[in-house]
Amino acid sequence: MLYRENGQFKASYHADQQIFPIAQDRWAILALITLAFVAVPALAPEYLFRAVLIPFLILALAALGLNILVGYCGQISLGTGAFMAVGAYAAYNFHVRFEGMPLLLSLLGGGLSATAVGVLFGIPSLRIKGLYLAVATLAAQFFVDWACLRLGWVTNGSSSGSVSVAGLNLFGLPLETPVQKYLFCLALLSLFALLAKNLVRGAIGREWMAIRDMDVAASVIGIRPVYAKLSAFAVSSFIVGVAGALWGFVHLGSWEPAAFNIDRSFQLLFMVIIGGLGSIMGSFFGAAFIVVLPIVLTNTLPALGALVGLNVDTAVLSHLEFMIFGGLIVFFLIVEPHGIARLWSTAKEKLRLWPFPH
Amino acid sequence: MGFFLETLTGGLMAGMLYALIALGFVLIYKASGVFNFAQGAMVLFAALAMARFAEWLPKLLGFESRLLANLLAFVCALAVMAAVAWAIERLVLGKLVNQEGITLLMATLGITYFLDGFGQTLFGSDIYKIDVGMPKDPIFVLESFFEGGVLLNKEDLYAALIAAALVAVLSLFFQKTGTGRALRAVADDHQAAQSIGIPLSRIWIIVWSVAGFVALVAGIIWGSKLGVQFSLSLVALKALPVVILGGLTSVPGAILGGLIIGVGEKLSEVYIGPLLGGGIEIWFAYVLALLFLLVRPQGLFGEKIIDRV
């Protein structure tokens, strides 16, 4: 009734190729962006920014990066945490070692360093795939963990790898209050999401998907596997690296290597699986789900436990969280392998026919 | 020389334990093509069950004997692992037949999280002791050759013996029994095995139970050495490079890979570590496996089935 493209004719290639071909979608997205940029900063309480919104934005960015590698190019990575760490520590080095380095340049420098490391650890993907590649990326995870802990020059000589940044500013504007940080992350996320969407719609995205679907067939029709795979690793680790730098600089402020350990890698992989492999939208859904779920559980489970006469303390709570995450992963893999993004598009299909089912 | 030999034997002992966990990976991969990330969680789960049953059963049934308690706890833990195997087959793998390896890998990741949480909810999350009466005192050997001889830990020796016995029993089981033959048939070719009437789902339950049994043994050995705690689950991450090195489908490969990684880790830590700042044990195994993958992707003894990319 409300949501259908009847009567929306496209008169030019430009109109035909836009990201949201249906007018209602465009309006909805525009409303969402306005809401995120204007209404949320004005209305949301500070706790919400610190605990939910900023982590969500940054992890969504990281999940977006990972989704390019896993969802679009089909190369599994269990070393995302490592690439985030490279981004964070490289950005820290740019920030500390060069006097007056603009924040944005430090962050991008972190992303570029992560790209270099990502491509380096992506090289095995040219010879191996699947399970073996997962182990190869785990090598990156453990190596980077160690390097951040033990190599003095990575952390500018601080012991145990803990570093901190303070007094961030963006071209002279201070970046201190949660609202400012939120807006900064939101702007970067929107930018990268647009970039990623256009990449995966373009020639290179099609190459990635061809490699994912069947690499032999792809190389037969003239797609260079080396170029496609390494470019996926490069783009993915760049975005992940920037997300890592943001996580350190903007969200944590001071951090140590444990912030980017293997659990972070798994968490991001879960976001991508639950959100939807091979979907930009899915990265957002997955990140939102995984950021919000623990908070919801923390607030509801003790009450639920009290109802049936069980005492749910923090230790039990964290174990229950583990169980629920694990169960959800399995559930999604079995019931909806394409994640929440697929549920969303199914809902949209239904909505187009509503209220008449045929 | 004495110090070198001590490091070497220390590495061999550690390697034997890695090999035990790697064995679980290989068994499951051979029979069902699933790369079982949850092996570490299974080790933790089995060890927790063992430790807690050994504590609970004497209180519940009112007897004192520690031997009896351990025996009963072992049987109970084995039953629990069989139940876990059944549940995994019924609830997860049975629904994911014919999916890609990567999907199955991610499913076992989910199982890992679930088992970690479930085990600790059920059995508690403190550090527990498993006391199966392994002697802890060190012995000295080869004293006639060097001054001071070589220090060996008796516990490690026993552990190595148990591991060797386990491997012998498993190979007998695989080679000589009817079930073992069926398992090898399934490992060889699912469809062919099914077409001659081997029930796949039952075979998978058996394989996962056997892997649970191996996990239980590994858990008991590690647990009596270090205490049963969450970090046990992470030992499995050490076993991944072992299977890569040895070949995903080879039992001798898992053993040899474990020994190589164990020895390499200890030797590199002692002799190369100081040059790099120490602590290289964490990644040494992985980098070794990674380099190995580039040269010989199927591992030492694995079948050459990796498709070229």
Image: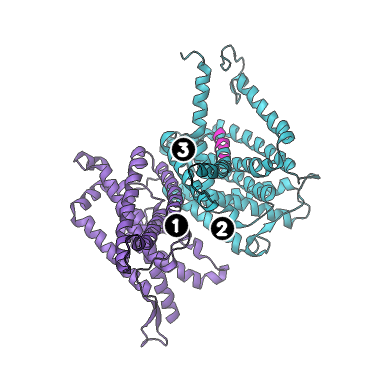
Chain colours: A cyan, B purple
Question: What's the amino acid at mark 1?
Answer: Ser
Q: Mark 2 lies on which chain?
A: A
User: Counting other residues with Cα less than 10 Å from the Cα at mark 2, is it few (<14), some (14-19), or many (20 or more)?
Assistant: many
Give the foreground label among 2 and 3: 2
Checking the image for residue B233, the label placed there is 1
Is A44 or A239 nearer to us in this picture? A44
Percent coordinates x, y for residue A319 in the rendering: 49, 50
What distance separates the C-alpha of mark 2 from that of mark 1?
Answer: 18 Å
Could you tell whether B293 is left or right of A297 in the image? left
Asked if the stretch drawn in magenta spans residue B69, the answer is: no
State which quadrant residue A104 falls in. Answer: top right
Question: What's the amino acid at mark 2?
Answer: Asp
Residue drawn at 37 percent across, 68 percent down:
B131
What distance separates the C-alpha of mark 2 from that of mark 3?
Answer: 30 Å
Q: Circle 1 sits in a helix, a strand or a loop, which is it?
A: helix
Circle 2 residue: A145
- Residue A227 in sight here: no
Percent coordinates x, y for residue B33 in the rendering: 34, 46
Examine the residues drawn in magenta and state their main secondary structure.
helix
Is A96 or B68 nearer to us in this picture? B68
User: Counting other residues with Cα less than 10 Å from the Cα at mark 3, is it few (<14), some (14-19), or many (20 or more)?
Assistant: many
User: Counting other residues with Cα less than 10 Å from the Cα at mark 1, is it few (<14), some (14-19), or many (20 or more)?
Assistant: many
Give the answer, above or below, for where A112 lies relative to B295.
above
Q: Assign the C terminus of chain B to one quadrant of the image.
A: top left
What distance separates the C-alpha of mark 1 from that of mark 3?
Answer: 34 Å
